[in-house]
Image (cartoon, rainbow, N blue to C red):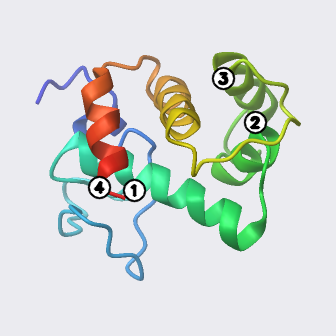
């Protein structure tokens, strides 16, 4: 585990999902505040990406967030992100307008969205397509 990797990559949590004791994600490692004070850690990138995709699905089902703008505004609140730049970057990666409706139950869309979020959260997207395919299959 290289120290120069981003925190999300090191934690196998490339979406930088906050730790919440009420969530028990598949493949989540036990919380250890010595290793990581804020974010979840996962046993593999596939499980971290699966959690990312699962959370986006919850946003669509429970909160009716159907656009890149709506999803990213919840994912990356303005109090700690340049959310408008995040929205625009993700929409551009997906080839859609920020206000165009998308469905994360569509495999191609879910994978493209997850890749865009990973890229934005970590400054790069280091995983092969197979990692995202496996993550989606774990949903």
Crowd class of label 4 (few under 14; some 14 to 19; many from 20; radius 10 Å) = some
**Alpha carbon separation for disc pair 3 and 4:** 22 Å
Q: Quick check: marks 1 and 2 in contact, CB under 8 Å?
A: no
The Cα–Cα distance between marks 2 and 4, rounded to whole angstroms, is: 29 Å
Query: In the figure, 34 relative to 120: above or below?
Result: below
Q: In the picture, which quadrant includes the C terminus?
A: bottom left
Q: How far apart are labels 1 and 2 at the CA level?
A: 21 Å
Q: Are marks 2 and 3 in contact (CB under 8 Å)?
A: no
Front residue of this view, candidates 94 and 23: 94
Q: Which residue is mark 2?
A: 83
Residue highlighted by disc 1: 51
Dot 2 or dot 4, earlier in sequence: 2
In this rendering, would 76 be left or right of 26?
right
Task: Give the answer, above or below, for where 126 lies relative to 16.
Answer: above
Residue 72 visible in image: yes
Q: How many marks?
A: 4
Identity of the residue drawn at 28% across and 20% down: 128
Q: Position of residue 8 (x, y in %)?
A: 35, 38
> Of all residues shown, which one is farthest toward the left?
1
Disc 3 designates what residue? 94
Mark 4 lies on residue: 138
What is the secondary structure assignment of the residue under circle 4?
loop
Of marks 3 and 1, the one in the foreground: 3
Image quadrant where residue 28 sits: bottom left
Note whether 119 is above or below 42 in the view shown.
above
Q: Earlier in the sequence, mark 3 or mark 1?
A: 1
Query: Is the residue marked by circle 1 packed among few (<14), some (14-19), or many (20+) residues within 10 Å?
Result: many
Q: Residues within 10 Å of mark 2 (few under 14, many from 20)?
A: some
Q: Which mark sits nearer the N-terminus, 3 or 4?
A: 3
Q: Mark 2 and mark 3: span between their CA atoms? A: 16 Å
């Amino acid at each position: 585990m290289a120290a120069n990797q981003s925190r999300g990559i090191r934690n196998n949590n490339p979406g930088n999902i906050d730790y919440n004791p009420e969530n028990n994600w598949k493949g989540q490692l036990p919380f250890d505040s010595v290793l990581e004070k804020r974010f979840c850690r996962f046993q593999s990138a596939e499980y971290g990406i699966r959690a990312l995709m699962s959370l986006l699905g919850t946003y669509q089902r429970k909160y009716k967030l159907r656009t890149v703008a709506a999803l990213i505004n919840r994912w990356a609140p303005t109090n700690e992100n340049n959310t408008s730049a995040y929205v625009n970057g993700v929409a551009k990666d997906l080839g859609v307008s920020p206000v165009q409706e998308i469905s994360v139950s569509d495999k191609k869309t879910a994978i493209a969205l997850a890749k865009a979020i990973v890229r934005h959260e970590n400054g790069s997207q280091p995983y092969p397509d197979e990692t995202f395919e496996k993550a989606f299959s774990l949903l």
